[in-house]
Amino acid sequence: MNFADRLHAATKELGNACLIGIDPHLDMLPEQYAAARNVELPRHVRAAAMGDFCVELVDLVAGRVPVVKPQSAFFEVFGADGHIQWERVVSHAKSAGLLVVGDVKRGDIASTAAAYARGLLAGCGAAHEDAHLCDAVTVNAFLGEESITPFLNVCRETNTGIYVLVRTSNPGSADFQLCGDPTLSERIADAVNRWGKDLMGESGYSSVGAVVGATHPEALAAMRERMPHTPLLLPGYGAQGAGAEDIAAGFHKGGFGAIVNSSRGISFAYKKAGRPCSEWREAAVDALDSMIQEIGAVAHAAV
Amino acid sequence: MNFADRLHAATKELGNACLIGIDPHLDMLPEQYAAARNVELPRHVRAAAMGDFCVELVDLVAGRVPVVKPQSAFFEVFGADGHIQWERVVSHAKSAGLLVVGDVKRGDIASTAAAYARGLLAGCGAAHEDAHLCDAVTVNAFLGEESITPFLNVCRETNTGIYVLVRTSNPGSADFQLCGDPTLSERIADAVNRWGKDLMGESGYSSVGAVVGATHPEALAAMRERMPHTPLLLPGYGAQGAGAEDIAAGFHKGGFGAIVNSSRGISFAYKKAGRPCSEWREAAVDALDSMIQEIGAVAHAAV
């Protein structure tokens, strides 16, 4: 089954379209994982403490949401030791039945993009070492179509997917993404549509998705129309300010067509809830319950 | 000394502005390193064979050129084992006296960009584990100014630099980078100018550089004028088709203001020269001699 169909099936089975971001900001980790911040400790020990947190977070959300999205930057803080933890967390999430979208935002010229696609989605050729591969990754199309084509080829070959950055959720997204008429974001959206045609699933969606920030509700509605068969990844819900009503326009009937990301809003819910860090798990589960309910209500109301 | 001044001093001392890209394409590695391609071998053994090649390449160019530019994608093919080799190659190049520009093209929202900046340029805080950090990295500004600011902060703190993608060398660069009027590339160039003001060196150049493909000579001349204090990184020379005359417009008087990249043109020169792979080192040195002479003549003729 291709990525689009696997995502569709998982969303249907669990009855929600929630995506939990795994962004282990060192300074927000609960005290139990403070070893990750201790510069006196060897790097691999610190990285492992961060990895422990991520694995526990995965266990809290497994079976409840269809997808998780680890962010490579926080792992790369620890260099190669962080990369070992990245592979540990991705493998753990997959064996817990979760789909994994690697948030890596890679983008480069054709031959280089092919190496990224292989490293992240296909592996280097030895089947027993592939447990750490992602089901999909985020990509940056700034270098043009030739930077995406190698990913499309690997997606076809390995039943994986990509989410192309179209309009990001951050305030700075307006600096360059709204340049031109049609805007840069609109041009990329049209390309995403085109790129996706050859990777359609039986669900009616393509394995070529798009990242569209939930923080721009008017743009989101226009993008949903512009890319009718594209699965959307909506960042910005929760910590970045978008509410449930802001994401409604991203969904098709039945609650399909989009997944909604929350990272800090779940993993570090204990901070916002004013609970002791010893209760970070309970706070995360409570926040997840609310999110599932809130997103579920909006998604199922979609027409 | 900040990055701009260190680069200026190294260019002056060696009398050339050549940048050697370290892009270990698995299928182009000489037979002596064929273990890297052997899917029967454990991943770490394969990665080490690739690393051996890179280390030898570094030794061939050390003392002759000011800078090398390893490409992260080719290391990431081997996951965490590739990352270990990345750190080995970067450390080796630095201890051989070379400046290292990590070609990673990262770009993300502010808090995430800060993690990338730290991981690549500042490290996680333990001084003895910092041998693998880059002197500068390439970055992608698609997410806007807030995706660059964290890099600027780290550059200031650690005397490192960035090269922002402005106009890439590949054919596909026209797909999105020429969108709008002023074009996306021109808008980013103006931002690069502004971002660089606070990171000026005594050499008259900033530590905020720009990537401008040598494959667009007319655009290069316009970009050189548009960003008068910005050190340029010019990809596209050699294998991608740009000749010495195409890069002339990138230089200021005395041969400063730009560095010219060649990757496959040096590392895999044995292929183009039709020499046996046992002579890859000699072929690389011959190609390097030609490049130094050719680029030197152009750079020193700049007015």
Image: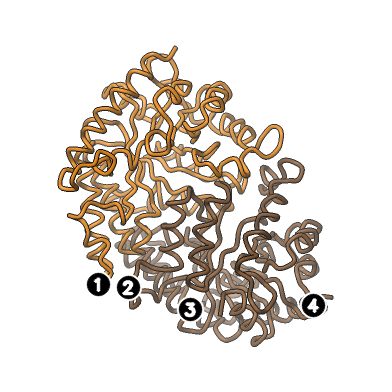
Chain colours: A brown, B orange
Q: Residues within 10 Å of mark 2 (few under 14, many from 20)?
A: some
Q: Is residue A167 visible?
A: no
How far from the left and from the top, in percent, is residue B265?
A: 32, 38
Amino acid carrying mark 1 in the image: Glu
Which of the marked residues, 3 or 4, is nearer the chain's N terminus? 3
Q: At 23% across and 41% down in the image, what residue appears?
A: B274
How far from the left and from the top, in percent, is residue B142?
A: 60, 46
Q: At 69% across and 32% down in the image, what residue appears?
A: B182
Q: Are marks 4 and 2 in contact (CB under 8 Å)?
A: no
User: Could you tell me which secondary element the residue under label 4 belongs to?
Assistant: loop
Rounded to the nearest angstrom, the CA distance separating label 4 from label 2 is 41 Å
Q: Which residue is mark 3?
A: A93
Most extreme residue toward the left, as rendered?
Answer: B278
Rounded to the nearest angstrom, the CA distance separating label 3 from label 1 is 27 Å
Nearest to the observer: residue A163 or residue A22 = A163
Quarter of the image for residue A233 reads bottom right
Rounded to the nearest angstrom, the CA distance separating label 3 from label 4 is 29 Å
Would you place residue B112 above or below residue A289 in this image?
Answer: above
Q: Are marks 2 and 1 in contact (CB under 8 Å)?
A: yes
Amino acid carrying mark 2 in the image: Ala
Chain of the residue under label 3: A
Q: Are marks 1 and 4 in contact (CB under 8 Å)?
A: no
Rounded to the nearest angstrom, the CA distance separating label 1 from label 4 is 48 Å
Q: Nearer the viewer, mark 3 or mark 1?
A: 1
Q: Which residue is mark 1?
A: B40
User: Could you tell me which secondary element the residue under label 2 belongs to?
Assistant: loop
Q: Which residue is mark 4?
A: A253
Q: Which residue is mark 2?
A: A126
How far from the left and from the top, in percent, is residue A182?
A: 76, 45
Amino acid carrying mark 3 in the image: Ala
Most extreme residue toward the front, as rendered?
Answer: B274
